[in-house]
Amino acid sequence: MSAVASAPGKVILVGEHFVVENEPAIAVAINLRARVRATKVEGEGVEVRSRELGLAQVFRGDEPRSSPLYPVYFAAKVTMENIGVESPLRVEVFSDIPPASGMGSSAAVAVATVAAVAKALRVKLVEDEISRLAYRAEEIVHGKPSGIDNTISTYGGAIAYRKTEGFLRLEADFSPVRLVLADSGLPRSTGEMVARVRRLKAKYPRVFEPLYHAAGRLAIEAGKAIEAGNFRALGELMNVNHGLLSAIGVSNEVLERLVYRAREAGALGAKITGAGGGGFIVALCEKGSEERVAKALREVSSRVFVVDVSGEGVRYEE
Ligand code: PMV
């Protein structure tokens, strides 16, 4: 028995980092997806294969967690434990989402793995369970993630997310805009960036508190702008959000250059997306202006993607 599931990557439009301390953030699913095929096999263990990484490994439970394929194995394992059915498996991963980009590739792979493994073992999980089990696999990769990635990848569309309250779906029509993402080319670790922000915040709590409060207000305003289809306001708020991210120490010269280039080329707004320190920036563009923005960014970035917001979360495929 074999089953295929897919799940989308994401872009955080506002609120990354602040979301870790329970401020609201807004994320959207995008039209780049991870696909996972899970197949019941003879033999033992869980064989994980990744087309993009060109790697394959059989896991039996005592392997070091350092393998890049370990989180996929772990997602399969927690799923089997949860549904109470164990079987030797082959899990194959195919993903359009660039890894370590802030576009939620690990969460999308985890979400698709949970759904595919359960279905291959003839159990249909509801979205809530898929998201929760994917979160457990995300903990292996990121330490203590906020949970925004597995949530948006499971449900799709646009969500406002708050750690202690879960998420709210935003009624949004993103058809007038596209997102342009550009890579700084600098590697970054989400865990390290989160720890770095924590240290600075602990050192200057009275300075950071109003910044966090402002970021929370900003996310609420951004949510209203999205629901009203006011993308000009959303762009402005994304610019302000970028300023707050610079203030808490996650920007650098390369990211600033990309952000300003996107704005000068006509983006409605541009900011770091995700953990910062490296990774990608996102530019919100009115349809028709995205190519101009992408062209300007390609002059200074080796990887530029133009993507659309996608309503679709996790789904089973034939
Ligand atoms: O860059 P990413 O996609 O790993 O996003 C990190 C987002 C943070 O808010 C910095 C961390 C989190 O767990 O939400």
Image: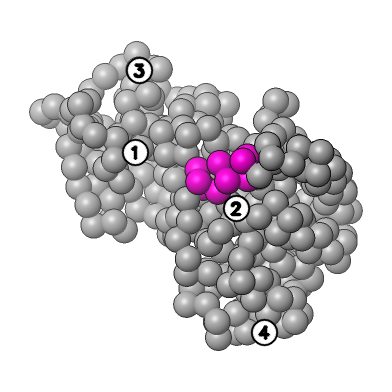
Amino acid type at circle 4 is: Arg
Q: Which callout, 3 or 4, points at the residue further toward the start of the chain?
A: 3
Q: Residues within 10 Å of mark 4 (few under 14, many from 20)?
A: some
Residue 244 x, y percent position in the rendering: 76, 55
Q: Which residue is mark 3?
A: 81
Membership of 198 in magenta stretch: yes
Q: Which residues are magenta?
A: 190-199
Residue 149 x, y percent position in the rendering: 57, 42
Q: Which residue is mark 4?
A: 292
152 lies left or right of 120: right
Amino acid type at circle 2 is: Gly
Q: Quadrant of the C terminus?
A: top left
Residue 225 visible from this viewpoint: yes
Residue 275, relative to residue 40: is it above or below? below
Q: Which callout, 2 or 1, points at the residue further toward the start of the chain?
A: 1
Q: Determine the secondary structure under disc 4.
A: helix
Q: Residue at x 50, y 43 (%)?
A: 191
Q: Residue at x 42, y 56 (%)?
A: 99
Protein image colouring: one colour
